[in-house]
Each structure stands twice: as structure tokens, then as C-alpha cells.
Image: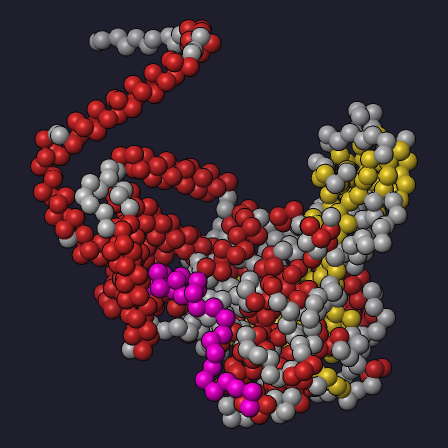
Amino acid sequence: MKRIHIKKPDIKGFFSKIRNLKKEDIKRHWKERKERRQKILEERRNSRFAKKMQPVYRMMDRFSLPLHYVLACILNFFIEVISRHSFFEAWEYLTGSPKVFLFNAFLIFATFSIVYLVRRRLFARILLSVFWLFLGTCNGYLLLKRVTPFNAQDLKVLSDALSLTGNYFNTFELILLIVGIAAVVLWVISMWRRGGQYTGKMHRFIALLGVVFWIGAYVLLTNFAIDKRVVSNYFGNIAFAYEDYGFPYCFTASIFNTGISKPSGYSEETMMEISNDREITKNETGRSEEQLPNIMFVQLESFFDPTEVEWLQFSEDPIPNLRKMFNEYSSGYFKAPSVGAGTANTEFEVLTGMSMRFFGPGEYPYKTYAKTKTLESAATALTSLGYGTEALHNNGGNFYSRAQVFNHMGFDHFTSKEFMNILQTTPNGWATDDILVPNIMESMDTTEGQDFVFTISVQGHGEYPTEKKIENPEIVVSGVEDEGERNAWEYYVNMVHEMDKFAGELIEAVEERDEPTVLVFYGDHLPTMGLEAKDLKSKYLYNTNYVIWDNIGLEKKDMNLAAYQIMAEVFERLDIHSGTVFNYHQERRQTKNYLADLELLQYDLLYGEQYVYGDKGCPITEGHMVMGVKDAAITEVVEQLDGTYSIYGENFTKQSKVYINDEKQSGTFLNNTRIDLKDSKLEDGDIIKVAQVGSSNTIFRESVEYEYNDGILTEVAKEADAVETGRNAFIDKETKK
């Protein structure tokens, strides 16, 4: 047997060569390398194989357009395989809806017209193919974790999504993702060098006209397809739309079809008629100030009554507290605008009274309009009647741009998880809802009069694990044969059971407060459990549940309500007539052209001329909200024996960060009164402060500043033009300077 000898590396010689390298040596090396590369390429071009393939290449170039379409069909098929997680489902889609399939392939084909603008055509084809497959892969993976598919609006919250990678990726998946992306990038780069170049004459002007032609052809074809109902430009359910109309079309529609298109018949005369000569802009109530109750809305993440599922059985009632409320107070089905996801859109409907059905497919107004512009909401409607308005959420303040959105909606305060000492989380890593009760009470203590409190929970958030995460569940689920599916349902139902406990605890806290209160609980959408309409007692996938609890003797009145109607209904029962859209619902809900006129009203308020407001203008022109309701404070800095520092104070949370001379320090949160600094060095004259920091290093709220001298802290007096406490997140950095 032949022995293999491994040559010992000459490390010493290698470093010796490095030390003695000259500029001429480097130039010669790269010249020789280039010459070798040119020689290899020349040999390849003149090889026997290359010569045999030249007629093939000429034919492919001559028939590149039809070949592009074939490639587009292949790519479209594999995109659907990835999106549907099944080769057979993709094949069924191709054979069952061939017109839709070919229409989507035409879009991909139109993008391939770009290759004629460059010489490296093979590389351009590869790059475009990778791009489409990457989008399809993103969609496929997201559909494994949630019901809502990948759309363009997801890119607008990319930074927030990155902060939640731990909730959607395990360590192995993250490593696999990074390695996979790196491998693809390296391969694409290598193809830049290996792909060769088109050697014929370039006609870039003609090629540019071709790009315009094929994109224009796609636009015309889209309009034709919509007219012939091959596809639709209204997505009642975005997940179903992607299944029916294909990923390429739906994703593209989410980019370009946003906002509300101008409805036919829009004019000042029409809006005067709809608004009853601007009568619906009134803000009034038939109750005296003393008779007005606190109004509280609690949005329960992915909540609905599990007993609505026909085939599920439970060891005991998973929602005893809410069940008692359903029986004793006004309740019914709550029609959400989405299934399995879309929390922010349910919020938008509830808070504004506007319907999502008139917006572009897959749009989230929280990511578009409301992120940058002010608009009326329940907060502005109740502020006009003297209410204090607070929002709370046990998740990050930047997620769905809520900090900005709630500011634009006119809230006074927003308490996010950055201001909560969250000690308990679910097995999936989400904060439990019990933390909300003390924070709600604390938030209400900031005002002397009535409060409007809007609370968003997060405990019930998916995904729901198919492995057993709860060893001794309080609620045992049966009726599901598959073990993984049963584990997922058992996990979800026990999270719902915890939400029910939270609802009971909140009611107790409100009763102890002994103030007139109306409290509304509702679910934002069904969970991501693959439910079909036939599985539910209501036979409708958009139905969750709501209940209106009160301690002021409201008559029990059961009815089904849409998300955009519920605020107006609560206002109506309290004899409150405030907020343009809410007044519209109260006056026009049972009338002819109710929804058509609602579309006109929404367009006028958001994208039109705001004829309804007249000379008075929009009730809200700028936000005034502050983050949180109390300041963190530093009381003492103690130098430890090892030279590190401990910061003592009050109201610290895990998101509290210490700044020295405006530089964030590395520290360890111990409890709400102590933060230990790791590698910091303090000198006399240094300025210290603590801030509540959200994702993307957003400073939501800062303490006062302290000057450090000889271990003693002295509060620094604020300048006259200093930023108001709690307004940091809404002040441009340049302005602050």
C-alpha cells in the first residue's frame, strides 16, 4: 500500500517571504495571475467543447426571449413549491390555475428584459433568478412560522423583525441561514468572473425600449387579468390571495398598490352630503363629566374561544372568567380584518373606525400612512371630552412603529416593555400578560379625570410548538390524533387560559379601584393553527370573540361587530358622539351605501382634500405623546473593590442603559434599583444619565443628567430649550443638538 506523505508547512519561510516582499513582487504576482486567468479563458473558448457549443449559444441568443419565458416558468414553479411547502400542491396550482401560473411567469419574464442592458448576460440571468428564489424562500419560511405571507410592508419593519430573530429562529437555523446566504453570495460573485460576456454589438437604447415595453405589457396584462377575474386587486385574506393568485403578483401588488385609490364620485359636494354638512365632525356627549366612565380596550393576542373548534375537547373550560363575562355582559363575534396575523391592522380598525378593505392588498397603515402622518383616533375623540389617553404593550415600543403611530394618533402616554420589569416569559419567549395589570393601574394614576386605556397583549403569540413544552398543563386537550398538532393546540389553549387569568385579575384591579369603567376584551385574529371555516361553529375564519364588561349598569346587548365598528358602538352606548368616523358609523350604519360612503370618507380624510374638516382642519396637527409614565433616577454611584461601578437608583428595567458623556455603557441589570457597569471608567466632571432604550438604539426616555465628582452626584440643571422628558423618541437628533 502506497504511503501518503504530508508535507510539513514551512511557516517560518512563509513569514520570511512576507517580510521581504517588495512592491515589484506584488505587481508581478498580480500580472502573472491575470495572464494565467486570460490563458485559461482563452483555452476554454478554444476548447473542443466550446467549439461544439458555439452553435448552441448562437441559437440560445437568437431565441433568448422564449427561453427566458421557459426559465420564468421554471422559477415560478419552484417559488410555489417553496411557498406551499409541497411539490404536489405546486403542481396542483399549475394544472388547476394555468392562466394564473402563466400570468405570474410573465412578470418574472418581464424582469429578464434587463439582461439586454449589460454584457454579462449570464451573470444577470443568474442574479435575477437568485433574487426571485430568495423572495420565494423568504415567503416559504415565514409561512412556516406564521399565516401571513411575505409582503413588501415587511421590509419596512426589518429592523424590528431582526430584534425578534430569537422568537422565529433557533441557533441551528440561524447558523444554517448565515452559511446558506454566504454560500450563495460567494457563488454569485464567482459567476461574475466565470460567466463570460456577450461579444456582439450592444444596442442599449433598443434594449431600454424593450424593458419599458415588457413592463408596460405586464401592466396592461394585469388590468386585463383583473377585468377577466383571473386575479383580483382586493385581498380579503392575504394568505388565501397568495395561494390563489401566486407569490410574484401578490408581492408586487403589495409594493405598488398601497393606500386608497380615489373613488368614483369623489367631490366636495359628495363629502358635504356624506358628512351632513360637516355635522359628523362634532365632539359632544349627553353625559356630565362626573358620569363619564373610564373606557378600557384590551386586545388579546391571537385570542378566541377554543370551544368554537368543533372537534376539540378540554379537561376543563379554558376561559372560565371570560365565559362568565360572555354570559353576563354584552358579547358576540368580533370580525377581524385578517386571519392568523395582522395584529396592527386590527388595532388600526379599532382605534380609527376605518376599514382595511379599502386599502391596497397586504398593506399595514401602521407602516405607511400612520407612521408619518397624524390622524383622528379614539384617543383624539376622547381627549376632546377631557379624557387622559394611555396605550400599553408588553412588547417593544418600536414594533409596528407603534411609538410613532400612537404619537400621531394623539395618545398622551405609551408604556411599552422598555418600561416594564418583565420577569416571566412564555416557553416561546414572549412576555406574560400579568405584567400589564400593575402597569395599567400605574398609567391610570397619571390623570385625575377619566382615562381611555388601550392595551395590547402578547402572550398568545405564535408559533405554537409541536413538541411538548408544558410538562403539566392545566388544560389537557384531546380530539386531535396527530401528536405534534395536539401539542401545538395544548400549548395554545394553555396560553389562552393564562390570558383568561389576566382578564380576571384586571377586572379585580378595576373593581378595587372603584371607578365607573367600561372594559372591552377582544381577540385580534385567529391563531396560526391551520383552521378552516368548516372547523368552526361560526363557519367563518375572521371571527374571534369580544365582551363589553362594565360596572355602570349597561344593558346586555349581544351582537356581532366588525373591528372598525366596535369603538363607535361603545361610544353610542355611553351617549358619546365624538370623532368623525365614529360619528359616521353611529349615524349611517344601517343605511344604504354605508360601505361605499365609508370608502369616500376614508379617502377624504387620509388622501383627499379633507373637505369634511373645512376651514377648521384636522383635529390633530402634531403629536404630544411621551413614552412611559415615570422617570428612572440615579441616587448613588458606588465603586467596587475590583474597580467596577454599581449604579443605584429607581425605576430601572432590563432596557435601562447607562450613558457616560452621551456614550452608552456595557452594563448588567440586576434589579429595578441596581445596574452594574463592566468596563466603564468615571472621572470627575463626567455626566451620567440612564435611559430606556428600544430596538435600533432608540432612546425613549431619559433621566435627568448628573455630574460625577469625588463619588458624589450633582443634578445638572436643564437648559431652557431641553427636550421634554419622555419625548426623546420623537425629536430629530439634529434638532436635539
Residue 465 rendering spot, x and y as whole percentages:
50, 53
Residue 432 rendering spot, x and y as whole percentages:
66, 56
- The answer to whether any part of residue 344 appears in the image is no
Residue 222's image quarter?
Answer: bottom left
Q: Residue at x 33, y 46 (%)?
A: 127
**Residue 235 or 482: which is nearer the viewer?**
235
**Residue 537 or 347: which is nearer the viewer?**
347
Number of numbered tags placed on the structure image: 0
- The answer to whether any part of residue 57 appears in the image is yes
Q: Quadrant of the N terminus?
A: top left
Q: Is residue 74 left or right of residue 136?
A: left
Q: Is residue 247 magenta?
A: yes
**Residue 581 or 453: which is nearer the viewer?**
581
In the image, is residue 737 above or below residue 593? above
What span is colored magenta in the figure?
Answer: 246-269
Q: Is residue 414 left or right of residue 581?
A: right
Q: Residue at x 47, y 68 (%)?
A: 258
